[in-house]
Image (cartoon, coloured by chain):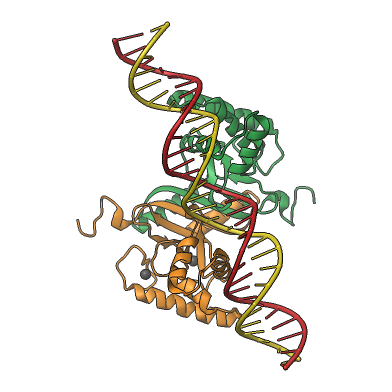
Chain colours: A orange, B green, C red, D yellow
Amino acid sequence: MDTAPLAFSRHNHSHCVSDALDAATTLCTERGARLTPLRKQVLELIWQSHKPLGAYAILDQLAAQATKPVAPPTVYRALDFLLEQKLIHRIGALNAYIGCPHPDHHHASHFLLCDDCGRAEEIHSKSVSRSIQKAASEAGFTVQSQSLEVFGLCPDCSPQDKHDA
Amino acid sequence: MDTAPLAFSRHNHSHCVSDALDAATTLCTERGARLTPLRKQVLELIWQSHKPLGAYAILDQLAAQATKPVAPPTVYRALDFLLEQKLIHRIGALNAYIGCPHPDHHHASHFLLCDDCGRAEEIHSKSVSRSIQKAASEAGFTVQSQSLEVFGLCPDCSPQDKHDA
DNA sequence: ACGAATATGTTATACTATAACTATCTTTGG
DNA sequence: CCAAAGATAGTTATAGTATAACATATTCGT
Ligand SMILES: [Zn+2]
Ligand SMILES: [Zn+2]
Ligand SMILES: [Zn+2]
Ligand SMILES: [Zn+2]
């Protein structure tokens, strides 16, 4: 099914990129937000893989593509825009950024992060969301945003890997 | 009950500090780890409140207490030790550190963080842990560590605050 | 075209964390 | 007790992440 997690599976990644860029274009148009060439370029760089990308890695690649030198604020402002539009998520433990595969509906930032290959997969578990919401409510806490970063080994990098053992 | 969350409630905080320092002393002794004066001093600084404390805030306070200037590695090495011993947790979204109230049993880092007052409360919900573990397993992912950072408003800072309305 | 608002460029700086080397302290075996 | 080995702490320098402040350029509605 096409809603299955992709990051840890073999897949045609060019579809991820084009889907993400198309969705971003549509959403920004709907919202009256301006997905400028620079912002789109940064989004595309982030989507080049399923590995969270640091701001300065983005900067280096921008600089390599551009003729003029690129300064940090250029990157951070684009990242701020993409974060505001929920087109990307920030992985706090890595100081890095990754594309959101479902930017059309707002949701918490829940990720599985492979310590070995570095890939990240966003998870959307009702059970996880509900249990977190419930735990917060019981503490009298009003949730505004949440970030879950689960580190470990993805199926490909697990020792008991079954996919070609 | 004495296992109830404290950070967001009125409580005698000196007990938090003494309990934490006592527990740390006991655990380090059991483990053959050396809770040196410097490390204990850093732990006590972190426990001065339930607000996550940044490394350079710790540094400034250390410097204020000491006669000699204090350099970053001094602080970061103490933090590394305390993290290894699970006496503190790191809050990735804030680049800050907070004391663990239950260092005797290993557990994931799950926090409620108030956007208004800055206080953090560690939560220990079986339901949250289980649902996360389940979601990871279903993705074929082997969990090694996890960090949950829930931002919002604590009971004291919520508009519909009932505690003295 | 005009002014307001938004976006980008530019320079400097703040904040967070680690590398590499030296010195001191602690433990342990002789 | 002493010396060697290992762990802890001091010191200096630098790497990595992010923002402030101000100038310029572009876009949008009128
Ligand atoms: Zn892909
Ligand atoms: Zn997402
Ligand atoms: Zn307390
Ligand atoms: Zn804890």
Residue at the location (56% across, 82% down)?
A29
Quadrant that contains the C terminus of chain A: bottom left
Residue at the location (49% across, 32% down)?
B104
Q: In the displayed structure, would residue C29 be above or below residue D24?
A: above
Q: Is residue A34 visible?
A: yes
Depth check, front residue: A34 or B145: A34
* Number of marks drawn: 0
Toward the right, the furthest residue is B165
**As drawn, is A82 to the left or to the right of B67?**
left
Depth check, front residue: B73 or B27: B73
- Corner quadrant of residue A10: bottom left
Q: How far from the left and from the top, in percent, is residue B55?
A: 58, 42
Residue at the location (53% across, 42% down)?
B89
Q: In the displayed structure, would residue A92 be above or below residue D2?
A: below
Ligand 3 visible in quadrant:
top right
Q: How far from the left and from the top, in percent, is residue C22?
A: 46, 30
- Corner quadrant of residue A133: bottom right
Quadrant that contains the N terminus of chain A: bottom left
**As drawn, is B115 to the left or to the right of B28?**
right
Q: How far from the left and from the top, in percent, is residue B5?
A: 62, 41
Q: How far from the left and from the top, in percent, is residue A28?
A: 56, 79
Q: Can residue B1 be seen in this view?
A: no
Toward the left, the furthest residue is A165
Residue at the location (57% across, 82% down)?
A30
